[in-house]
Image (cartoon, rainbow, N blue to C red):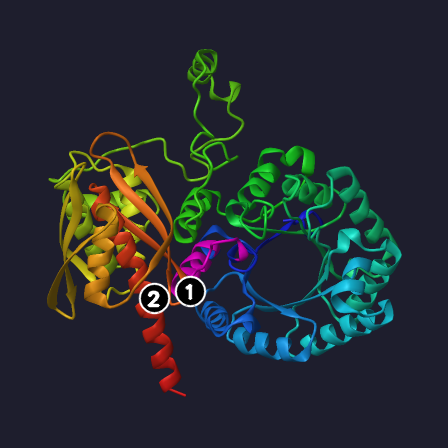
């Protein structure tokens, strides 16, 4: 692979992506996403902002210790306390990177930092030098670079490279840029910095004007060799450049961009689905590359053309991104071996204990549905295999509801091999079920958001409920799966409570060990 044409993919789903309004991931979920990003083959995984919270520190440290094959980066402000904390989290990584940042635009210097240009320059250089004491791989980001004075920015870039920065990121922090202007901006800085060949120049574009991907590609055309993006384009405000769109633009238009990336294309769709599920952020149907409608054709002319020659209306293959067009079905008579083979065809290589959990769940679904589809199986893996340990498990649910009936729910939960039962009334069957759960667990949640999705088609389709629950001032994402949507709803609520309990119990145990 020609290093001059190599573009490095820097994924910030776990840092900037988690800053999306309403998104809150626990340590296990962050690790699962990081492992999937490594399977996808991204070059750099920005695991978090270690100094921001004890939870973020623990997640970054665990990812650094467990995930192999990708560089693991941690973000920190340009000061010694942040850098120390970041290195403490990263030091177990196979390939660690300290990513430090400081704003360089006049508006940030005046209103946020209250510092002069000279002071910021000194601080940036000192931060890079200090980080370099810990780690050979140091990235510096000039926050709000696209609104900075080019001459001053070029000086900062030159000096931080001189101080040891191996990557310098020039972000469009507020999504203000447009492609032609942003491309010229990157080219200008490249031409003004005498030692630019000693570092990789990176771009990080936000989507406030809907141009994050276009701006990122313009940056690549003008010399940037690293692009920072997030799965499904999630992130602050309107989000980041979409990882899958960057990947497929460079692949599909390789002759135009003449750039090379090292990625496992078959993991794109699965990565998108995992992030969507764990963050609770659904992908819009018309989203490029991974939206539900991306490879659907309704127009008769389009359908006729695709049947004759797919390239008439499709510029990429759905199979390439891991979206199987075969929807082979399994039924209740299917055996464990056939189930295992089918899961491996879908890309899920499960350990024996994971396979046991998945197969048990498959049999439960197969008893309720005539056919179990690939979508059902993917949902099952997320529901059973990737779930956190269950303190509270639903074993029985009975609901009475109707137009002239006060909604009432009776719930049985298993806790430590013992069954507890409670009944409650509510504004509706879901509310009643959740209140009964509250009585048993003595944990009270407030549902902030509720989404019901159908997995597959037909009257017996699985219902997937994604919820956001406020418990004790923290927000937890809940997920429930069942052919009965009331049961799925209550399971989603219990899932959030389990996450709360697991986090609290884990933190208490951790504190007791110190």
The quadrant of the image that shows the C terminus is bottom left
> Mark 2: few, some, or many residues within 10 Å (few <14, many ≥20)?
many
Figure quadrant of residue 220:
top right
- Image disc number at residue 500: 2
Q: Earlier in the sequence, mark 2 or mark 1?
A: 1
Q: Is residue 358 above or below residue 451?
A: below
Q: Which residue is mark 1?
A: 474
Say if residue 340 shows up in the picture.
no
Name the spot of residue 223 as percent of width and height, x first. 75, 48
Give the prevailing secondary structure in the magenta stretch: helix
Q: Is residue 94 magenta?
A: no
- SS state under label 1: strand
Whether residues under marks 2 and 1 lie with C-beta atoms below 8 angstroms apart, the answer is: yes
Instruction: Indicate left or right for 10 with 469 as reference.
Output: right
- Which residue is depicted at the point 51% across and 30% down? 316
The local crowd at label 1, few if under 14, some if 14 to 19, many if 20 or more residues have their Cα within 10 Å, is: few
Q: CA distance from mark 2 to mark 1?
A: 8 Å
Q: Nearer the viewer, residue 480 or 256?
A: 480
- Vertical comparison of 127 with 197: above or below: below
Residue 34 visible to an observer of this rendering: yes
Q: How many marks?
A: 2
Question: Would residue 46 be found to the left or right of residue 205 on screen?
Answer: left
Q: Residue at x 51, y 57 (%)?
A: 18
Segment tinted magenta in the rendering: 19-37
Can you name the residue that lies furthest to the bottom here? 514
């Amino acid at each position: 692979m020609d290093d001059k044409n190599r573009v490095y993919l820097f994924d910030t789903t776990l840092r900037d992506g988690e800053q999306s309004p309403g998104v809150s991931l626990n340590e296990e979920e962050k690790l699962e996403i990081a492992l999937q990003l490594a399977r996808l083959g991204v070059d750099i995984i920005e695991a978090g902002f270690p100094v921001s919270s004890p939870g973020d520190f623990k997640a970054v440290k665990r990812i650094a210790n467990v995930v192999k094959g990708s560089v693991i980066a941690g973000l920190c402000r340009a000061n010694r306390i942040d850098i120390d904390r970041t290195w403490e989290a990263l030091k177990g990584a196979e390939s660690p990177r300290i990513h430090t940042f400081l704003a360089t635009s006049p508006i940030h210097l005046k209103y946020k930092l209250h510092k002069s240009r000279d002071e910021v320059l000194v601080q940036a250089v000192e931060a890079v030098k200090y980080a370099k004491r810990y780690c050979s791989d140091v990235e510096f980001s000039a926050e709000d670079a696209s609104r900075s004075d080019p001459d001053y920015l070029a000086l900062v870039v030159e000096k931080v490279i001189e101080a040891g920065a191996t990557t310098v990121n020039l972000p469009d922090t507020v999504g203000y840029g447009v492609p032609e202007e942003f491309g010229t901006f990157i080219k200008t800085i490249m031409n003004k910095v005498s030692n630019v060949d000693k570092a990789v120049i990176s771009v990080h574009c936000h989507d406030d004007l809907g141009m994050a991907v276009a701006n990122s590609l313009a940056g690549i055309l003008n010399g940037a060799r690293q692009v920072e993006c997030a799965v499904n384009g999630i992130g602050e405000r309107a989000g980041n450049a979409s990882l899958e769109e960057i990947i497929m633009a460079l692949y599909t238009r390789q002759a135009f961009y003449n750039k090379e990336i090292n990625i496992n294309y078959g993991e794109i769709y699965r990565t998108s689905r995992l992030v969507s599920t764990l963050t609770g952020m659904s992908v819009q149907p018309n989203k490029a590359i991974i939206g539900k409608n991306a490879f659907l054709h309704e127009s008769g002319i389009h359908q006729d053309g695709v049947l004759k020659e797919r390239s008439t209306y499709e510029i990429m293959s759905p199979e390439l991104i891991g979206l199987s067009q075969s929807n082979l079905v399994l039924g209740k008579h299917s055996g464990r071996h056939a189930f295992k083979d089918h899961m491996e065809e879908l890309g899920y290589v499960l350990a024996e204990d994971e396979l046991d959990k998945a197969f048990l769940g498959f049999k439960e679904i197969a008893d309720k549905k005539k056919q179990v589809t690939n979508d059902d199986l993917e949902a099952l893996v997320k529901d059973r295999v990737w779930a956190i340990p269950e303190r509270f498990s639903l074993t029985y649910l009975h609901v009475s509801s109707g137009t002239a009936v006060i909604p009432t729910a009776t719930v049985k939960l298993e806790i430590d091999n013992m069954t507890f039962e409670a009944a409650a009334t509510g504004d509706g069957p879901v509310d009643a079920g959740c209140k009964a759960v509250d009585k048993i667990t003595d944990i009270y949640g407030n549902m902030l958001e509720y989404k019901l999705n159908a997995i597959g088609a037909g009257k017996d389709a699985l219902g997937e409920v994604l919820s956001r629950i406020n418990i004790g001032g923290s927000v937890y994402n809940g997920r429930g799966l069942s052919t009965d949507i009331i049961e799925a709803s209550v399971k989603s609520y219990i899932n959030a409570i389990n996450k709360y309990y697991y986090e609290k119990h884990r933190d208490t145990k951790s504190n007791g060990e110190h």
